[in-house]
Image (cartoon, rainbow, N blue to C red):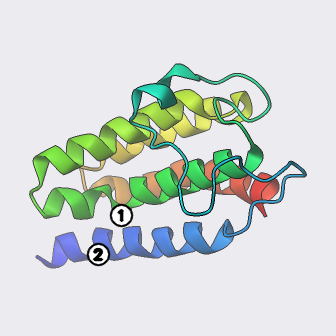
């Protein structure tokens, strides 16, 4: 149990860091067209997949929408081991699908880095050394840097 607790603690710390680093997107664009009470379209929905990476915000309508989705999914990637530990297979598969869909929609400048994060996060479900060896942190770093540069 101790071996599982360390990666989960690290994942939780990354989640907190990712959420606090990107709380207010201001990339010089107009606010998101979504109303405050209706969040951006979930990445796993068909309409979300239709807008694969194109335009300055990838498959997203605005910088705010891109920042919210990318930040949320990066955080979700760090929490995948917790979802796996809970044994909710359908929920875990949904989260993996949403992460993959987001990887398709991110702006071109982030495509390779987010694809790597997706790959490493999924690998971490079966190989906990991904977290203890720093592989997850290395994959998360360019995504966090992009978020810092474009969403703060």
Residue found 13% across the figure and 64% down from its top: 86
Q: In which quarter of the image is the C terminus?
A: bottom right
Residue sitting nearer the eye, 3 or 100? 100
Are discs 2 and 1 less than 8 Å apart at CB? yes
Q: Quadrant of the N terminus?
A: bottom left
Residue found 27% across the figure and 42% down from its top: 94
Secondary element at image label 1: helix
Residue sitting nearer the eye, 138 or 44? 44
Query: Can residue 1 be seen in this snapshot?
Result: yes
Asked if residue 69 is positioned above or below residue 118 in the image, the reply reads below
- Give percent across and percent down for residue 57: 74, 35
> What's the mark number on residue 72?
none
- Give percent across and percent down for residue 138: 54, 52
| Residue marked by disc 1 | 132
Badge 1 crowding class, 10 Å Cα cut-off, few under 14, some 14 to 19, many 20 or more, is: some
- Give percent across and percent down for residue 9: 34, 77
- Give percent across and percent down for residue 24: 73, 67
Badge 2 crowding class, 10 Å Cα cut-off, few under 14, some 14 to 19, many 20 or more, is: some
Measured in 3D between alpha carbons, the distance from the residue under mark 2 to the one under mark 1, in whole angstroms, is 8 Å
Q: Which of the 4 quarters of the picture holds residue 122? A: top left
* Left or right of 18 on screen, residue 134: left
Q: Which residue lies furthest to the right in this view?
A: 28
* Left or right of 88 on screen, residue 68: right
The first of marks 2 and 1 along the sequence is 2
Frontmost of labels 2 and 1 is 2
* Left or right of 48 on screen, residue 148: right
Asked if residue 122 is positioned above or below residue 47 in the image, the reply reads below
Residue found 70% across the figure and 27% down from its top: 108
| Residue marked by disc 2 | 6
Residue found 77% across the figure and 25% down from its top: 55
Secondary element at image label 2: helix
């Amino acid at each position: 149990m101790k071996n599982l607790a360390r990666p989960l603690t690290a994942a939780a710390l990354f989640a907190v860091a990712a959420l606090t680093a990107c709380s207010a997107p201001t990339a010089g664009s107009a606010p998101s067209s979504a109303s405050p009470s209706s969040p951006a379209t979930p990445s796993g929905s068909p309409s979300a997949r239709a807008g694969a990476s194109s335009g300055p915000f990838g498959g997203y309508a605005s910088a705010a929408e891109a920042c919210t989705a990318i930040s949320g999914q990066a955080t979700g990637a760090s929490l995948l081991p917790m979802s796996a530990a809970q044994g909710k297979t359908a929920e875990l598969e949904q989260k993996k699908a949403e992460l993959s869909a987001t990887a398709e929609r991110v702006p071109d400048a982030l495509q390779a880095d987010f694809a790597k994060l997706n790959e490493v996060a999924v690998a971490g479900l079966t190989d906990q050394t991904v977290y203890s060896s720093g592989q997850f942190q290395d994959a998360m770093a360019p995504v966090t840097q992009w978020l810092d540069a474009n969403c703060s």
